[in-house]
Amino acid sequence: VSDAQGRFALGGLVPGAYDVVASKAGYVRLSYGQRRIFEPPTALTVVPGATLSLSMTLPRSGVIVATVVDASGEPLVGFEVTALRRRFEGGRAVLANAGPFQPLTNDRGEVRLFGLDAGEYYVSARPGAHLLRNPPRAEGETFFPGTLLVDGARTVSVSAGVETTVVIAAKTQRLANITGSIFDSAGAPVMDGSVSMTRQESNRTSGVPLNR
């Protein structure tokens, strides 16, 4: 923990390469060598008997307070809200998670997305996993201000030390069904087999394509 002058000391380190991370409530969590969240960090190489000195600058973070409502303006509880930023992966523009978590809306339909770097964000809301069980919710992933299509989404500007408030009007979509059969290698039906599905974009590890 740093002292009143921001100084810290880490001792007894085994030689090797380290990622040094600094964080504090109200500030952007950064690794050594980063000025912005998506920049690559700089590994710190520790050799036997060495004493290294470094300094890090943490910018003030911003907050998005999002409220998710239905078509009647009533709050929706248990919806997962995500802040997304535009990035380029493999030569194409995608939307990638801007934080390590996706909180669920409370009884007022609200969440606070904190620790955000200043910049432009897309914000999406979708039913939490517990709401996708039978009967499934008809609301699809909705982007601010209230569209199922990424191309219709608007960005939210976040400033350091400022709370920005947005309202997302969740949109419904027609639900689909899949039926099928399971057979073994001999062609006989498999009884009591279990079938599950996972949406490919739900993890967002590869991002969501932007057609723009």
Image (cartoon, rainbow, N blue to C red):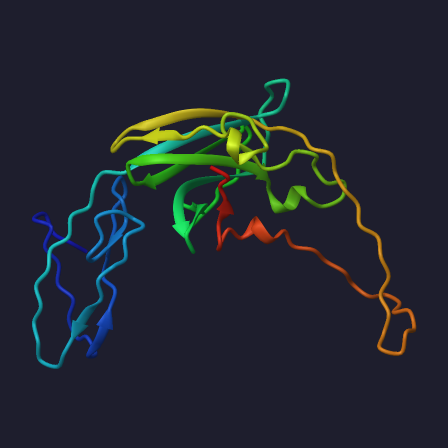
The residue that appears at 24% across and 69% down in the rendered structure is 18
Counting from the top left corner in percent of width and height, residue 112 is at 42, 34
The residue that appears at 25% across and 33% down in the rendered structure is 160
Q: Is residue 140 above or below residue 73?
A: below
Could you say which is closer to the camera, residue 55 or residue 210? 210
Counting from the top left corner in percent of width and height, residue 142 is at 57, 33
Could you say which is closer to the camera, residue 8 or residue 144? 144
Horizontal side of 40 relative to 57 (left or right) equals right
Counting from the top left corner in percent of width and height, residue 73 is at 59, 19
Quarter holding residue 117: top left
Q: How many marks?
A: 0
Quarter holding residue 84: top left
The residue that appears at 52% across and 29% down in the rendered structure is 152
Residue 99 appears in the rendering:
no
| Quarter of the image where the N terminus is located | bottom left
Counting from the top left corner in percent of width and height, residue 90 is at 43, 56
Residue that protrudes farthest toward the top in the picture: 72
Horizontal side of 200 relative to 191 (left or right) equals left
Q: Is residue 127 above or below residue 38?
A: above
Horizontal side of 106 relative to 133 (left or right) equals left
Residue that protrudes farthest toward the right in the picture: 188
Residue 29 appears in the rendering:
yes
The residue that appears at 25% across and 32% down in the rendered structure is 161
